[in-house]
Image (cartoon, helix red, strand yellow):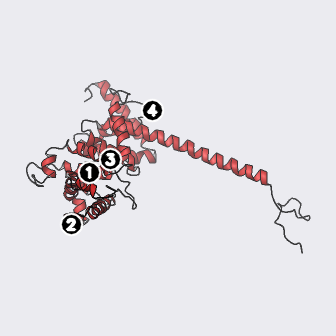
Amino acid sequence: MPPSTRAGQTGREERDDQAAATAGNGREEGWLTQVVRILQLANPALTAEEAIVRAMSLVNVGNQVPRGEAEKIPKDVTSSITHIKKLNEGNWHTWEPTFIDCLQQVHNAKEILYGEIAPGSEGYDEDLDKALVGLIHACCDNSPDSRIDTYTVRGLDEEAQLGSTLYAKLKKALTLNDVVKRAGLQDRIHTVRMYNRDVIRLGRELDSIWNDAARLGKRFDEDLKKSTLYRCTAQDWFYTNSVDALKMAKPDCKYDEAYHTLAKKQQDGEVTGRIRGAARVATSTEQGSTNQAEQGPRGRRDPRNPSAPPKCYVSWA
């Protein structure tokens, strides 16, 4: 909390003026509005002025550092974000340990997963549902073609893997999710059985269930939207889901640290993208000019109009 002194009030007024001036930019106004709303949802005690000041420190993270905060980004925060990005490129068996590690941060996660504590009871932690949904969506690209193959079944030697507690955890995770229930996947999950030790059938059904859950895309329920940072930058899937997954994986990570890191990565990416785009345009223009100079215009000029460009070879009338 800032000291209640005249100097502190003056500093806040100056920052408020800066926020109001910056809000004139249409693009930053939209970003600022979203961040202010999310900060107030995450911390209802924040006033509008305090939320604006904090949001502006995020918008201008590339130009200035909020007072009292170190410029150096914690290494574990950066490494966690890098790891989360890699999760999207692997199969379930690759990132399952991280999934389970995240669940260990939730109160009574084990009891909830195995049905010992039912939803609505005193010991039920609603954050588990939010963590499960966030982790599912952090590992798919939310596009209609999104697909996550949990296993590639090659033979009966994988029966132990498919019938292990891993499958039980995934099944329970999907049944706990209200969005999945509304999508009609719960009944399908309960019908999965090891008929005649048919491992291939089980593996395919498990893949199908998981892929359908992944295709749910952005159909989050309203409570989940309000309780996460999903709407921070909805136009940038990786930015949004990285913040969500980072908070789930590292509950002690501060929001401003996550924003600080990701904002810099986003700014660097935008600059790199503009440079590459300009290079592509310059290269294509140069190649076009070179090709035209090498080939030269084909055809012959009209003797009645020498200044006109050459025409294709045709028979003159």
**1 or 3: tag closer to the N-terminus:** 3
Left or right, 302 with reference to 183: right
- Amino acid at circle 3: Thr
Kind of residue sitting beneath label 2: Asn
Residue at which label 4 appears: 63
Q: Are marks 1 and 3 in contact (CB under 8 Å)?
A: no
Kindly report which numbered mark, 1 or 3, lies closer to the viewer in this rendering.
3
Q: Residue at x 86, y 59 (%)?
A: 307
Q: Position of residue 79 (x, y in %)?
A: 36, 36
- Find out whether the residues at labels 3 and 2 contact each other: C-beta distance under 8 Å: no
Residue wearing tag 3: 94
Residue 148 sits in quarter: bottom left
Q: Is residue 302 above or below residue 72?
A: below
> Callout 2: helix, strand or loop?
helix
Tell us which disc is closer to us: 3 or 4. 3
Question: Mark 1 to mark 3: distance in Å?
Answer: 30 Å
Q: Amino acid at mark 1?
A: Lys
